Every structure is written in structure tokens, then in C-alpha cells.
Amino acid sequence: MLSLRKALVFLILQFLEDEKFEESLHKLEKESGFYFNVKYLYEKVQAGDWVEVEKYLSGFTKIDDNQDSIKIFYEIRKQKYLEALDRRDKAKALEMLDNELKVFSTLNEEGYKELTQLLTLSNFRENEQLSKYDTKTARSILLIELKKLMEANPRFRNKLTFPTLKDSGLQSLMNGLNWLHLFGKNPWAKKNPRPEKNPGLNPDIKTEFTDDTCTPPNGPPVAADAKPASSNSEMLRLQRAFLFLILQFLEEEKFEESLHKLEKESGFYFNVRYLYEKVQAGDWVEVEKYLSGFTKVDDNQESMKIFYEIRKQKYLEALDRREKAKALEILETDLKVFSTLNEEGYKEITQLLTLSNLRENEQLSKYDTETARFILLIELKKLIEANPCFLNKLTFPTRKDSELQSLMNGLNWLHLFGKNPWPEKNPRLNPDIKTEFTNQTCTPPNGPPAVADAKPASCNPKMGIWLSPEHINENVKALKKARDRELEEQKLLLKNLEYLHGIIKLDHMNGQDFASMQLDELRAILEKLVRHGSSNVRDKALYISRKLDANQGAGQADHTHWNGAEFAQHPLSLPSGPITRLRAKRFKETKWANPRELD
């Protein structure tokens, strides 16, 4: 059976692809491990992005998982090695041989020796097998080989095919529900108790976050069939609120990389805590990448100052490590853009290259990397808060736990996947989705539609087909009633089961031969419990039935089984030791559900 968590991941993947959030899409594929995107792998192999190829694969298999995995990583690293030789970059090729290919030397000693010997040739095409080597052709051949290895690898089983989904499944499922009310009319209100003093902190969330039960500030309640406005600003607000639900889900499921990629790509929420972590770790590449989703160097004065402070710190740390070549590269590539804006400051940091130790400069005499990063964070916080590019993006809206899952629970979300979401190439890949996942718009196998006049509302081709709000509400109410009725029935069955179990134990312990009821009646009730009960009730009923057959008339009973967790919660549950007369009397006097009510 397809779990809610897995279904949500597939629906979010579809949403990310529809919205062109490519980086977030592939990060979530990798982190969840539910779907391996072969097309993405092909793109990265054809581009020669070997670092990303191995990173993506690491979400699905490790090098030592099995023979197929070993061969996959070997073929990739061998191609990477050959391309370094083709560029005449022997230093890089030697590094790969020692760090990446050596792990295979014990498994294929001859192959490793052959690769090593290629370093001795001025041109590796002198090797007969590589005489016609061409990078583009070699990559195409590699892709064919990788495809075979992945299809044979059990680590990729059930992960190479994306399930068949209706268009815009997640949006269409939630369309018509009053899910925006989870955010409230002003989810940021707690962060801005005096909105009249600083209206910029409050997002423009107004009357579109109302439904037929709410009264807008200026007018009567919105009618049930009222259509939303089609303005771009409204669609942006809807998308923003929807993305916050997805971000919350990613955070709760610990999909950290996907979370921060989506924050950056969407540009709706700037995670200050994440920026702090990366600055403290000195991961300057990721710091600038993350910031690039919200502002550019030349957006305004605050943005310029943000990037200048970060690059200056990066430059000072290179000097502190005595890496003057790296410092010079940073100066020419990263800091030169600020030379026209602050000519004096640029000259000062250039002069630091002439010093044997940057602490010879009076202002840097007490320089310490950890302290410098901490001071930088304080400065960045001030600049970000003053920067209009970050307005309304520094606070996550107030929300309850697991809101997206709560909305999905009880809805007929499995219908979005269809009865056969995976192609018929491998029937084992098909989840057990049968006729119980029908709603009022579907025709069950034995009868007419559940609601004869239920028709899908008008649809947008990009959003798929959805039900109108009144039909959605009817469906949800019907599902709730059915679930409540089923719970009541199961409680009744469980009470009868405890009643029967107690009588059997008492009568066995008192040496009676089921004097409290006829044996045929008891067997009939047990059969109904087995037939109509939940799996828990059914298992217990079967157990009692077997005990009844084994111990009838023998005055024997098992006094240790089920005397613990199953019955200990009830104040009258039977103890595992000898039963007292008072306890037996209280047990028999208890008003249990009448077993005959099962009829």
C-alpha cells in the first residue's frame, strides 16, 4: 500500500517540476530515495558534471552495496580519469588514481594496472584500445552501460519509473478546501504586534483567505460558489501560502538540502539560521549561492555591503592560511567589482598581500577567524534587516505541526495515482490500490456512481480536474461519518471480545464448563468477530476460538497470554496470578456490550 508520506513526496516532486524548481526537485529525489531520475543523470553525465553524478547516486546506493553498484562507480570514475588524461592534466589524473580508483585495485588488479600505465604515455591514444577515443562518444557508451547496471541493481528496484499522476495533483486535491485558513488572516501578527507602526512586516493576506463561513471585513459572507480572482498578485499569494506548507513538510521530514534549495529557488523565505550555520562553517560558496536567491550584488547599497563583507572575510581567511595564490584569485575575481565604489578600501586590502603575516597590519593585530565570523554575522543581520529585498521574508508564518499531512488525511488522495500508477512492465511495482479508493465521481464495479449528480467543476488544463467546494465538503463529511461509524463498530466488537475472554478465563478457573452461555452461541459470536472485526480484533478472536477448541471441558486456560498490554489498561482486567473472588464478582457484574447486538 502506498503510504501518505511517500504519496506526498511524489506529489511534491510533481509540483516542483511543474513550477520549474529544478534544483529542489533533484535534491528531494536524492534525499527521499523514492525516485531515481534517469533523465537528470543522463544530463549530468553528458555535461561531465561528475561531482553531481556521484552525489545524486549516493542518495540511492553506496559503492560497496553490491557488484552492480561497484561497477557503476568504477565506470564513472574511469571515464572521469580518461577525460583528465585527454586534457593532459596528469596531476589531476594522478590524484584521481590515488583517491578514487585505488578502492577498486583489490577487486580488479589487472584493470587498475592498465589504468596506471596510461600515465606513462604522452598521449593515452597510443594504447590500442583507446586509439579512437572521443569524449562525446565515450560518454554515450557510458550511459548505455549505466542504464543496464541500474536496471539490474536491486537498489534501484521500483525507483526508475515515476507513477502516473493526474496533472497538478497536489493543487487539484487541495483546491476548494479552506486550507489557507490554517495560516489565519495574519500569520505574522505575533511578530509585529503594532502593524500600524510597521506595515511592511505584514504580508498582504486579505479576504481571499475566507470561505463561505467567514465574514470579510467589508461585506457579507463570501458565497460558496464564489470564484477566486484571476489576478497575478492573488496567484502569487496562493503559491506563497502553498509553498510554506511544503517547506514545513520538508523540515519535519529532515529533507534539509531540499528545504534550503526550495527556500532559495522560491525566494519566499530567507532562513537566517541556515545562513548563520554556513558562515560559521566558512562555506562561502554556499553562502553566496543561498543569498543569490534573494538579492544580487548590484541590487542596492545594502546588498553591495553584504557581498563585500562576505568576500572580504573569505579573502582574510585565505591570507591567514598563507594561501597567497588563493587570496590573489579572490582579490581579482570577487573583490575587484567593489574597487570603483570604495577605491581606498580596495587598496588597503590589496596591500595585505605584501605582508608575510596579515597581523602586521595594526587593525588586524588581534585577528581571530572565529571571532571575525561572529562579528560578520552581527553585521550581516543588520544589513539584511535593513535591505528591502528581504522584506516579509525573514519570518516563517505561525502554523500547527504537520499541516500538509493533516489536510491530506481523510481525503481520497490515492485516486490521484489511479488504479495502476506504475506501468504494467513489472506488475510487482503496482501498489494495492483497489475499488475502496473511489469517490462520488467514480463508478464502482457493482453499481451506479455513489452520487448521481456529482459532476467535476470546470477545470484549468494545468490544474487538472477538481470538485467544487460543496462537493468537497460533502465528500469529507461522508468520509468522517463512515470513519466514526467504523470506529464505533470496532469498539463494540472489542468490548464483546473482552467480555468473552473474561468469561472463558473465569469459567476455566472456577472449574466450570462455560455455564454462562451455550457453546454454540459462543462459537457463532467468535465467527462474527473474525468476519467483521479489524485485524487486531480478528487475531484475538481466532486465538480465543483455538483455545476454546483445545481446552473445552478440561478446565484449563492460558493465564499468562494477554494479561499484559492488551488488558492491563482496564481496571477490571484479569491478573496473571490467581483471581480473587471480589475481582471475579466485579468483572462479571460489569456491564459489557451484549454479544447478541452483533446480529
Image (cartoon, grey):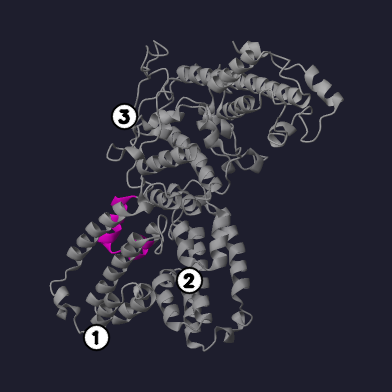
Quarter of the rendering containing residue 135: bottom left
164 with respect to 246 (left or right): left
The answer to whether any part of residue 314 appears in the image is yes
Q: Quadrant of the N terminus?
A: top left
Residue 120's tag is 1
Q: Is residue 537 magenta?
A: no
Tell me the SS state at disc 3: loop
Examine the rendered structure and indicate whether residue 343 appears above or below residue 450: below
**Distance between the alpha carbons at the discs numbered 1 and 3:** 61 Å
Q: Which residue lies at the image location 37% right of the left edge and 12% below the top edge?
A: 447
Please give the residue where the numbered disc 2 appears in the rendered image.
342
Tell me the SS state at disc 1: helix
Three-letter code for the amino acid on which mark 1 is drawn: Thr
> Counting other residues with Cα less than 10 Å from the Cα at mark 3, is it few (<14), some (14-19), or many (20 or more)?
few
Q: Is residue 49 magenta?
A: yes
Quarter of the rendering containing residue 525: top right
Q: Nearer the viewer, mark 2 or mark 1?
A: 1
Residue 153 in the image: state x and y as whole percent.
Answer: 33, 54
Q: Nearer the viewer, residue 495 or 500?
A: 500
Please give the residue where the numbered disc 3 appears in the rendered image.
461
> Counting other residues with Cα less than 10 Å from the Cα at mark 2, is it few (<14), some (14-19), or many (20 or more)?
few
Check the image and name the residue furthest to the right: 582
What's the magenta bit mostly, secondary-structure-wise?
A: helix
Three-letter code for the amino acid on which mark 3 is drawn: Pro
- The magenta region covers 37-54
Mark 2 vs mark 3: which is more N-terminal?
2
